[in-house]
Image: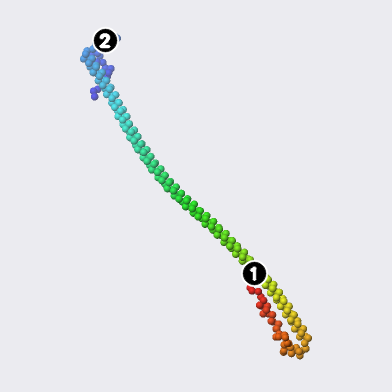
C-alpha cells in the first residue's frame, strides 16, 4: 500500500503562490494531473479504509450472526430435548398413575367384596347365635320346669311318707298299748298258755319290729 499523502499539501510550483479573490488558478497541466492523481489516490485510500472497516464489521456481524444462529439451534435442540424428556416423564407418570389407579380400583373392589362377605357371615352368625340362645333358653326353661316338677313330686312324696310314717307309728303305739293292757288283765298261767299257743283266728303274732321294712319300703326314690 502506498504511503498516505496529506490532502492539504499544495502541489509543487504553487507552494509560494498566493491567490487573490476572484483570480483564476492557472496551473501547469502536469501539475494539474498530479493533483488529480493525488486526489484520486487519497479517495481510493479512504474508500479502501472504509471498505476494510465495513468488511470487518460485516465479518464480525457474520460471525455474530453465525454464533447467534448456532446458539439458536442449540437452544432449539435443548428445548426439543427438554420437551421430549418432559413428554417421556409425563408419559411415564401417566402410565404409572393409570396402573396404580387400576390396581387400587381392583383392591378396593376386592376389599368391598370381602366386607360384604364378612357382613353376611356376621349376620348369619348373629342369626345362628340367636337360635342357639333361644334353644338354650328353651332347654333351661324345660330343665327348670322338670326340676320344679321333681321338687314338687319329692315334696308330695315326703309329705305322704311323713303321713304314712305318722300313721304307722300311731298304729304301733295303739297295738303296743293294747298288748300291754291285755297282758295286765290275763293271769300268769293264761299268759303262759297264750305265749305257748296262739289264740284261734289271730294267726301268728306280729313282732314289734315288723313295721320297719314297711318304713324302708315307703322311702321316696332319690
Q: Quadrant of residue 143?
A: bottom right
Is residue 57 shown left or right of residue 216? Answer: left
Give the residue number, with chain letter if any, for mark 1. 150
Residue shown at the point (65%, 74%) measured from the top left:
220
Does the image show residue 1? Answer: yes
4 horizontally vs 165: left or right: left
> How many numbered discs, if any?
2
Ranked by sequence position, the earlier of labels 2 and 1 is 2
Residue in the foreground of this view, choosing between 163 and 99: 163
Seen at 28% across and 25% down, the residue is 51
Q: Are marks 2 and 1 in contact (CB under 8 Å)?
A: no
Q: Is residue 213 above or below residue 15?
A: below
**Which corner quadrant holds the N terminus?**
top left
Q: Quadrant of residue 207?
A: bottom right
Q: Nearer the viewer, mark 2 or mark 1?
A: 1
Identify which residue is drawn at 23% across, 23% down: 2
Q: Mark 2: which secondary structure?
A: loop
Question: How far from the left and from the top, in percent, is residue 120?
Answer: 52, 55
State the residue lying farthest toward the front: 201
Screen quadrant of the C terminus? bottom right
Check disc 1 and report its element: helix, strand or loop: helix
- Which disc is residue 24 wearing? 2
Give the answer, above or below, for where 81 lies relative to 57: below
Q: From the viewer's perspective, is residue 78 above or below residue 46?
A: below
Q: Position of residue 206 (x, y in %)?
A: 70, 83
Q: Locate residue 53, reporting x and y percent.
A: 30, 26
Mark 2 crowdedness (10 Å alpha carbons): few <14, some 14-19, many ≥20? few
Name the residue: 74% across, 81% down: 175
Which residue is situated farthest in the left direction here? 30
Measured in 3D between alpha carbons, the distance from the residue under mark 2 to the one under mark 1, in whole angstroms, is: 174 Å
Q: Nearer the viewer, residue 35 or 80?
A: 80
Amino acid at each position: 500500500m502506498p504511503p498516505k499523502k496529506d490532502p492539504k499539501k499544495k502541489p509543487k510550483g504553487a507552494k509560494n503562490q498566493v491567490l487573490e479573490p476572484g483570480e483564476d488558478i492557472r496551473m501547469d497541466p502536469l501539475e494539474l494531473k498530479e493533483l488529480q492523481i493525488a486526489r484520486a489516490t487519497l479517495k481510493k485510500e479512504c474508500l479502501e479504509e472504509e471498505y476494510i472497516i465495513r468488511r470487518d464489521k460485516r465479518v464480525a456481524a457474520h460471525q455474530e450472526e453465525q454464533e447467534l444462529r448456532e446458539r439458536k439451534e442449540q437452544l432449539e435442540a435443548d428445548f426439543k430435548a427438554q420437551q421430549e424428556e418432559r413428554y417421556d416423564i409425563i408419559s411415564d407418570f401417566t402410565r404409572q398413575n393409570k396402573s396404580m389407579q387400576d390396581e387400587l380400583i381392583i383392591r378396593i373392589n376386592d376389599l368391598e367384596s370381602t366386607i360384604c362377605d364378612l357382613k353376611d357371615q356376621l349376620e348369619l352368625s348373629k342369626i345362628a347365635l340367636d337360635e342357639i340362645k333361644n334353644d338354650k333358653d328353651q332347654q333351661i326353661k324345660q330343665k327348670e320346669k322338670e326340676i320344679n316338677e321333681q321338687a314338687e313330686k319329692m315334696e308330695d312324696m315326703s309329705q305322704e311318707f311323713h303321713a304314712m310314717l305318722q300313721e304307722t307309728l300311731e298304729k304301733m303305739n295303739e297295738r303296743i298299748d293294747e298288748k300291754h293292757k291285755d297282758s295286765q288283765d290275763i293271769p300268769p298261767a293264761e299268759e303262759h298258755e297264750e305265749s305257748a299257743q296262739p289264740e284261734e283266728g289271730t294267726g301268728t303274732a306280729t313282732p314289734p319290729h315288723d313295721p320297719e321294712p314297711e318304713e324302708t319300703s315307703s322311702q321316696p326314690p332319690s
